[in-house]
Image (tube, grey):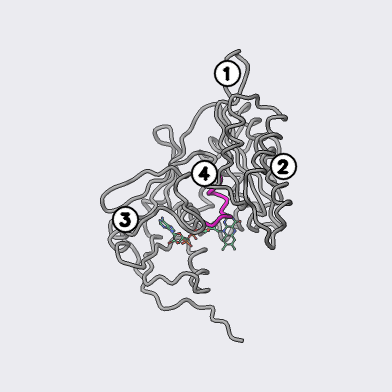
Amino acid sequence: MHYMQVPSQVEYERATSVEHALSLLNRPDTRVVAGGHSLIPMMKLRLAQPEMLVDINGLAELAYIRLDGGQLRIGALARHADLLNSAVAGEHFPIFHDAERVVADPIVRLWGTIGGSLCQADPSEDLSAAFAAARATVVIRGQDGDRMVPVREFHLGPYETVIDRGELLAEVRVPVQSGTGSAYEKVARRVGDWSVAAAGAVLRVGEGGNHEPVITSAGLGLTAVGAEHFVAAEAEEFLVGGPADEDSFAAAGAIAAEHCRPVADQRGPEDYKRHLVAELTARALRRAAARAAAPNSGPNSGPNSGPNSGGART
Ligand SMILES: Cc1cc2nc3c(=O)[nH]c(=O)nc-3n(C[C@H](O)[C@H](O)[C@H](O)COP(=O)(O)OP(=O)(O)OC[C@H]3O[C@@H](n4cnc5c(N)ncnc54)[C@H](O)[C@@H]3O)c2cc1C
């Protein structure tokens, strides 16, 4: 038997400006190509057959990571490696460094982009859960201007987003808040592999009514386990107003495991994935809380920083 592993014929244009890209994207069956690490393999397998590719790799104005107006702003063309190496991102959101350490391998991370990761809308993308936990907003650019969409409303389902014809993802914005700690925990079968399951947590601890420390906001993202919009909403609700302690973290993990919808596949059976969700959620919360308590001790502060769940490192 002979299997074809080449894409069908496709037109190709290299965008010279964002305006140029947007005008090209108005044509039917046209797709952006950024790092190409997801789109090109899909084209080779004929799972995607666009008539035209608009290459945005020349658009340096979409490749940045900076702090601005109380928000971390990440251009869509920033690479995974840029986020991994960004001191400002690591300082405010160690969850992104945790996640990037275990996204694929260094070669994929050098080319794969933040925008491509979110737009691919693969249920196993690590950054979708990390940004959902951090309650990020995406900036979608069209010829009529920008629209802001909470990342928790950006994905419509597997491989589907709210981006329309003639639009591209321009930026991801993450609100920076003091007293916040965050972490990401993933289990994969081998270094560089996709998640069997993963959990991200962003916690803010403040003062409760009786001046005792309580969780004032909680963001929980889940990867690869069928969580709606990558979010463990019931566990978030449970945490807010309660203490940041082991009992709360274990209970939140159990709630997250109960409400997600993993499916059995080559990465494991459903009950194993639920077990991982409970354990990884509790671990991510524990590390996030420790980081919230020690915010100034460096980009990767907190217990177990560094080597992370057996993932690839640079
Ligand atoms: C071997 C391998 C292992 C991997 N392992 C992991 C892993 O462990 N965890 C993980 O999270 N990911 C993993 N990935 C996926 C990778 O992180 C991203 O999916 C990939 O980098 C997507 O980014 P890209 O820039 O290559 O996107 P592309 O392939 O260029 O594009 C992907 C999709 O997004 C669209 N798109 C891209 N940019 C924009 C934009 N700015 N606006 C609108 N649409 C856009 C494209 O049209 C296409 O539909 C792996 C990939 C490979 C090849």
Per the model, the C-alpha gap separating discs 2 and 1 is 27 Å
Which numbered disc covers residue 131? 4
Can see residue 296?
A: no
Give the structural element (helix, strand or loop) at label 2.
helix
The residue carrying mark 2 is: 279
The residue carrying mark 3 is: 18
Give the structural element (helix, strand or loop) at label 4.
helix
Q: Residue at x 38, y 50 (%)?
A: 170
- CB atoms of marks 3 and 4 within 8 Å: no
Give the structural element (helix, strand or loop) at label 1.
strand
Q: Residue at x 48, y 71 (%)?
A: 43
Instruction: Using the rendered view, name the quadrant where residue 4 is placed.
Output: bottom right
Is 305 located above or below residue 225 in the figure? above
Can residue 189 be found in the magenta stretch? no
Can see residue 101?
A: yes
- CB atoms of marks 3 and 2 within 8 Å: no
Mark 4: few, some, or many residues within 10 Å (few <14, many ≥20)? many
- Image location of residue 188, percent across then percent down: 69, 54
Q: Residue furthest left?
A: 144
The residue carrying mark 1 is: 207
The residue type indicated by label 3 comes to Val
Residue range of the region highlighted in magenta in the rendering: 122-131
